[in-house]
Image (cartoon, rainbow, N blue to C red):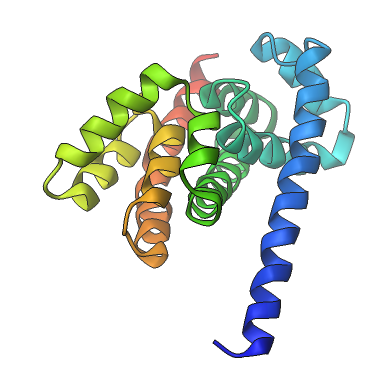
Amino acid sequence: MDQKAVRLRNILTISLILLTLLSGVFILRGYLEGRFDSAESLQQYIGSFGPLGPLVLTIVQATQVVVPVLPGFLGCIVGAVMFGPWGGFWCNYIGISAGSIVSFWLARRFGLELVRQMIPEKKYQVWTKWVNEKKSYTVVLFLAILLPLAPDDILCYLSGLTGMPAKRFTWIILLGKPWCILAYSLFFSYFI
């Protein structure tokens, strides 16, 4: 890799880390202020940003994957209620996909030490064993990302520790993630 490519990669890595930290502080502040206790409080928080609300929701959803401080479906509820099924879908899909890819890259870049700090020990043991036992981890990961209730955040970090190519992981997220989020968006916009 030439000097220019290495420099660009380092700048991108530092930028992602700074953006993640800034978003984390932003989210942590809202969390400590009790803004994420319920769908109603999160909705008020997002609404307080006016026309920037969709961007804030997208950042919240990306951050909640990287630093899991609230369940992702809570953001899906808020997006669907505030911005309708399609607006909520796009905010949630972009945010969750971006957060998943960032988690993968953080694990790839900083390794096991970071992953063990991000995932509680008991869950780490269970899911590491599960990942290592699968013969076709790519298929299993795709199905887990496709279906609701899988521990997506954990799997994104653990995938970064595997030999899976980043391009394959990105395609799994981009192709598998929208269906569950779309189902949540449609359900929550019509039944909540």
Q: Nearer the viewer, residue 10 or 51?
A: 10
Q: Residue at x 83, y 23 (%)?
A: 29
The quarter of the image holding the C terminus is top right
Left or right, residue 99 beside residue 160: right
Answer with left or right where residue 63 lies relative to residue 133: right
Name which quarter of the figure residue 152 lies in.
top left
* Residue nearest the viewer, comparing 191 with 39: 39
Total numbered labels placed on residues in the image? 0
Give the residue at x 60% y 20%: 70
What residue appears at the point 49 percent right and 37 percent down from the top-left corner?
Answer: 115
Which residue does the image show at 38% across and 27% down from the upper left?
A: 124
14 relative to 6, above or below: above
Residue extending furthest toward the bottom: 2
Q: If the image is split into quadrants, where does the N terminus sit?
A: bottom right
Vertical position of residue 119 compared to residue 155: above or below: above
Give whichever of 110, 59 is nearer the camera: 110
Q: Give the image location of residue 2, x and y in percent.
A: 60, 90
Q: Is residue 134 above or below residue 10?
A: above
Measuring from the top left, give residue 139's x and y in whole percent. 19, 49
Residue 49 in the image, given as x and y percentages of width and height: 88, 33
Residue 41's x, y, as percent? 75, 12
Where, by quadrant of the figure, is residue 67 drawn? top right
Residue with the most extreme left position: 135
* Left or right, 85 with reference to 141: right
